[in-house]
Amino acid sequence: MQKKIYVAGLFDDDTASKVNSAVCTVAGVTNCAANASKAQVLVDFDENVAGIEDSINSAISSTGVEVLGG
């Protein structure tokens, strides 16, 4: 499954890189592309993994970026 998550606080490529690294550590995530210019994070993941969307949001939030919705 692929999900586009809108965020606030994703101001530069360095922060986008931190978000990518954090989200890619979540079990079940196969790809992550954070885009500072679009203020969004595009994530590919296995929707059969219990609680994965909450885990992805937590990983994004752990970098100081606020999850607005997806």
Image: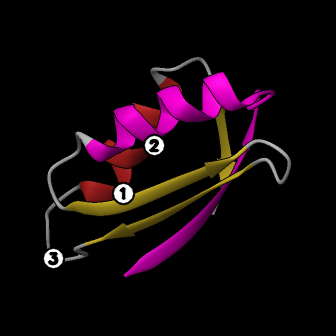
Q: How many marks?
A: 3
- Element class at badge 3: loop
Disc 3 designates what residue? 48
Residue 64 is situated, as x and y percent measured from the top left of the image, at 59, 17
Left or right, 13 with reference to 32: right
- Element class at badge 2: helix
Q: Quadrant of residue 69?
A: bottom right
Disc 1 residue crowd, few under 14, some 14–19, many 20+, Cα 10 Å? some
Asked if residue 3 is positioned above or below residue 57 in the image, the reply reads below
Looking at the image, which residue is at 38% across and 70% down? 44
Residue 14 is situated, as x and y percent measured from the top left of the image, at 63, 23
Tag 3 or tag 2, which sits nearer the N-term?
Answer: 3
Give the amino acid type for the residue marked by disc 3 in the picture.
Answer: Asn
Label of residue 57 in the image: 2
Looking at the image, which residue is at 85% across and 47% down? 37
Disc 3 residue crowd, few under 14, some 14–19, many 20+, Cα 10 Å? few
Q: Is residue 65 magenta?
A: no
Residue 35 is situated, as x and y percent measured from the top left of the image, at 70, 50
Q: Are marks 1 and 2 in contact (CB under 8 Å)?
A: yes
Q: Quadrant of residue 42?
A: bottom right
- What residue range appears in magenta? 1-24
Looking at the image, which residue is at 23% across and 39% down? 25
Q: Are marks 1 and 3 in contact (CB under 8 Å)?
A: no
